Image (cartoon, rainbow, N blue to C red):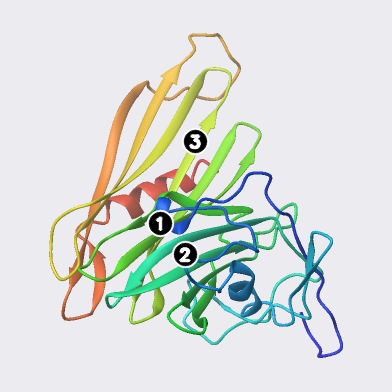
């Protein structure tokens, strides 16, 4: 979005089902009019207005003058220009998180994608004690479709959490998925790593890669164990494909541990990166 005279139209598609209260589970799909926490007058619309200044809601449509510029989650530079014009928010998801022992709220705001381009999806972190404040925001749209990955949040520290998102798209016989591990620390969103999972199928075989993320032990931040399990089955049909992979199963894993000296998570092995390079050769 460029130029102060350009107006971005934001249309929010309200979900048919009512969003659950934040306290009911890690990920919810709230409506704008819902209160963020019980007993507070702050609504989710109040939070969205900090990302879309001038947001108004009329006849089931929300519109705003612009979407603020945000950085890409995997970039270290300054914020980029804002998202597509006009912008359409197809999904709104919320997760309660902690940073330094303080209660925060993270919103995932999906502004859609082109047919072959990654989505513009803002992950925003808010303070909700008193008047709501936007603490940090980044574009986490690494592929066409982006949402929180189940469970969406890990309690990795005594007062700090990690958020999990997944971006994906489908082609004929191919399923691409890129998960992002994002630490919430010092009221900032810090990318730990991205993990690729790719599944493909043809006449003679089906090969699936399934991602699993689990919290381990450790202080001040717990280990995070990430694994990709690949299962290959064959159909036994006589196909004209160049090659049929051998059937079987394998699991590739890495444990991300907090390194105090660098103040970052680091994997204990390059196994997942090696797998990603092998997988990319099949694209």
Q: Is residue 25 visible?
A: no
Q: Which residue is mark 2?
A: 38
Q: Is residue 111 above or below residue 76?
A: above
Q: CA distance from mark 3 to mark 2?
A: 42 Å
Say whether disc 1 or disc 3 marks the residue closer to the N-terminus. 1
Relative vertical location of residue 74 with respect to residue 165 in this rendering, above or below: below
Q: Residues within 10 Å of mark 2 (few under 14, many from 20)?
A: few
Label 1 CA crowd tier, 10 Å (few <14, some 14–19, many 20+): few
Q: Is residue 10 left or right of residue 137?
A: right
Q: Quadrant of residue 5?
A: bottom right
The Cα atoms of the two marked residues, 1 and 3, are separated by 35 Å
Residue 48 place in picture, x, y as percent: 63, 72
Instruction: Return the x and y of residue 57 as percentages of the image width and height.
Output: 77, 68
User: Which residue in the rendered view is the most extreme toward the bottom?
Assistant: 4
Q: Label 3: which residue?
A: 199
Residue placed under numbered mark 1 in the picture: 23
Badge 3 or badge 2: first in the primary sequence: 2
| Rendered-image quadrant of the N terminus | bottom right
Q: Tell me if residue 13 can be seen.
A: yes
Which numbered mark, 2 or 1, is in the foreground of this view? 2
Please identify the residue farthest to the front as the structure is shown: 39
Which of labels 3 and 2 is toward the front?
2
């Amino acid at each position: 979005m460029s130029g102060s005279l350009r107006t971005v139209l934001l249309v929010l598609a309200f979900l048919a089902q009512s969003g659950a209260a934040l306290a009911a589970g890690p990920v919810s799909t709230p409506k704008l009019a819902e209160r963020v926490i019980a007993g507070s007058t702050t609504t989710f619309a109040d939070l969205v207005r900090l990302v879309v200044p001038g947001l108004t809601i009329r006849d089931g449509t929300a519109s705003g003058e612009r979407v603020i510029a945000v950085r890409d989650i995997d970039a270290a530079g300054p914020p980029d220009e804002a998202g597509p014009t006009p912008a359409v928010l197809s999904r709104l998801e919320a997760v309660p998180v902690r940073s330094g022992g303080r209660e925060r709220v993270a919103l995932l705001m999906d502004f859609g994608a082109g047919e072959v381009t990654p989505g513009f999806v803002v992950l925003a972190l808010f303070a909700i004690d008193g008047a709501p404040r936007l603490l940090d925001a980044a574009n986490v749209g690494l592929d066409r479709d982006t949402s929180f990955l189940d469970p969406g949040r890990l309690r990795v520290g005594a007062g700090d959490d990690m958020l999990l998102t997944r971006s994906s798209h489908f082609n004929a016989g191919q399923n691409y998925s890129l998960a992002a591990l994002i630490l919430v620390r010092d009221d900032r969103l810090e990318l730990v790593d991205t993990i690729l999972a790719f599944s493909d199928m043809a006449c003679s075989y089906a090969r699936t890669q399934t991602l699993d993320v689990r919290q381990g032990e450790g202080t001040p931040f717990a280990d995070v164990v990430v694994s990709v399990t690949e299962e290959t089955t064959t159909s036994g049909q006589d196909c004209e494909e160049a090659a049929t992979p051998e059937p079987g199963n394998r699991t590739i894993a890495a444990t991300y541990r907090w390194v105090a000296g660098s103040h970052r998570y680091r994997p204990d092995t390059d196994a997942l990166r090696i797998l990603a390079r092998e997988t990319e050769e099949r694209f």
